[in-house]
Amino acid sequence: MLDQANRTFICSVVFIDLVGYSKKPVGEQIRLKTSLTNNLSAAIKDIPVNDRIILDTGDGAAISFLGDPEDALFTTLSLREAMMQEGMSATQVEAAGDDAVRMGINLGPVKLVKDINGHPNIIGDGINVSQRIMSFARPGQIVVSRSYYDVVSNLASEYAKLFTYEGSRTDKHVREHEIYVIGHHEGALKKAKDSMKDRAASTVTNVRKMASATQPPGSGTVTLTVPSFARDKKTLTLIALGLAAVVAVLGVLVIFKKADVPPPAPVAAAPVSVAPAPEPPKAEPAPPPAAAPVPQAAPAAEAPKAEPPKPDPAKPATGAKPEAAKAADPAKPAARAVPPASLAFAIQPWGEVFVNGKSIGVSPPVKSHRLPPGKYRIEVRNTTLPAYAETFDLKARDEVTIRHRFQ
C-alpha cells in the first residue's frame, strides 16, 4: 500500500465519534474505547487490509475504504447493531446521549501519505468533509453526504429505503452540505451482510490465485484454491466419477501398449535366414554291372573297361547322411543371435516415447527398452511442450541413456 503514496483515491471515509468521551473518567474512557475497538474489529474483519486505513482520533476513529463503497455502509450498520445487541433498542441508542457514538460517511478524494511513524495515513477533502458530516449527527445517528448517497442508493433497492433526506447544513467554514440519515431496515442490513460475504469469498480466492501465480519455481509451498463449483457436492461427485473413469481407461491403454511391445530376445531388424533342413537323398538306381569280358581267341585284342558313372555334384551320393550334406555346403552358415542394444530413459516430469514413429509407452514408468542394432529415430512428447527428437545408430550391446526435462 505504501508504494502507492502521493496518489489520489476516491474512497469512502467513515468518521466515528464517542459522544462525551473527554468528560468521562479514565476508567470509563478505557471501557468505551475497548468496546469500540472490539466492535470495530469484528465489523471490518472480512475487509482486506490493503483496502482500508484506520486512524485513531483519540475520542473515535477515521476509516478510509479504498475498495467497495458498501464496505463503509456495512461497517457503520454493524457497529450500530452491536450496540443494540448490548441491551439497547434503536430508540435508546439515539437517546443514550453520552453513552452513544455518532458516525458520518463521505465519498470524496484523499491522498495516501506516511505519518511521522512511517505508517500509512490519508489527507484531503474526503476525510475533512466526513468529519463535518459527522458533526451534524445526533448521538446514535449515522449521517451521510450527498455524494455517498448518490452512489450507494443506486446499488440496490434495499439501500435506497435506508436514507432519509435531512436538508442542507452549513459547517464552521460556511460550506453547505446536503445530508441524509441512515434509518433502520432489516432488509438493507441483510443485503449488506450478504454482499460483504460474497466480496470476502471472492477476495480470498483471488489472493490465493495471485500467490500461486507469483510462487517461484521449485518452491516447497503449494497453495490450493478450491473452485466455486466444488461447493456443490453433487457436481463434485460427478467430476470425481468422471476422473476415475478417465484414469481407468488410461490404465487399460497402458497395459495394452505394454503387451504390444515385442520381447527383446528375437532379432527383428536384421533377420538371419536359416537353411531349411535338407531333404533325405533319393535313392538312385544302381548302375548296371559291367559285362563280363568275352574271351577272345587272341589275347592281344582286349575289350575296353566300362567306366563307372560320374557322381552328380548337385545330388549327394547314395546313402550320404543329412549332416554330412549340410556340412558340405559352405554357402549356408548356421544362424546365431545378435546381442541387442539397450536404451535407458530419464525423462522429467514425463513423456511418451516413440521409436521410428511407434509409441513404446510413457516414461516414467517405462525406464528402459531393448532394440536390435540399427538406425533409429527416438522422439519424446509431452502434450503441447516442444518435443525432443534425436537419431541414434545403435550397435550390438550399446547402452544409451536419453535424458530430457520438459519446461
Image (tube, helix red, strand yellow):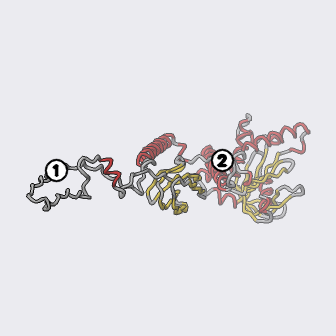
Residue at (76, 65) in percent of width and height = 8
Query: Mark 2 against mark 1, which lies toward the viewer?
Result: 1
Q: Residue 399 bears which disc, if any?
A: none
Whether residue 33 appears in this view of the structure is yes
Circle 2 sits on which residue? 222
In the rendered image, the quadrant that contains the N terminus is bottom right
Earlier in the chain: of badge 2 and badge 1, it is 2
User: Which element is circle 2 on?
Assistant: loop
The amino acid beneath tag 1 is Ala
In the picture, measured across the screen, residue 368 lies left or right of residue 69, that is left
Numbered circles on residues, count: 2
Name the residue carrying label 1.
Answer: 286
Q: Quadrant of the C terminus?
A: bottom right
Q: Position of residue 225 (x, y in %)?
A: 61, 48
Crowding near the residue tagged with mark 1, few <14, some 14–19, many ≥20 C-alpha atoms within 10 Å: few
Give the amino acid type for the residue marked by disc 2 in the picture: Val
Viewer-nearest residue: 379 or 18 = 379
Where residue 367 sits in the image (x, y, percent)?
54, 48
Structural crowding at the residue carrying mark 2, measured as other residues with C-alpha within 10 Å and reported as few (<14), some (14–19) or many (≥20): few
Q: Secondary structure at mark 1?
A: loop
| Residue at the image point whose x is 41% and y is 45% from the top | 259
Q: Is residue 195 above or below residue 356?
A: above
- The picture places residue 251, in percent across and down from the top left corner, at 45, 44
Marks 2 and 1 sit apart, C-alpha to C-alpha, by: 95 Å
Q: Nearer the viewer, residue 129 or 385?
A: 385
Q: Residue at x 85, y 47 (%)?
A: 59
In this rendering, position of residue 3 left or right of residue 406:
right
**Furthest-top residue in view?**
87
Q: Quadrant of residue 81?
A: top right
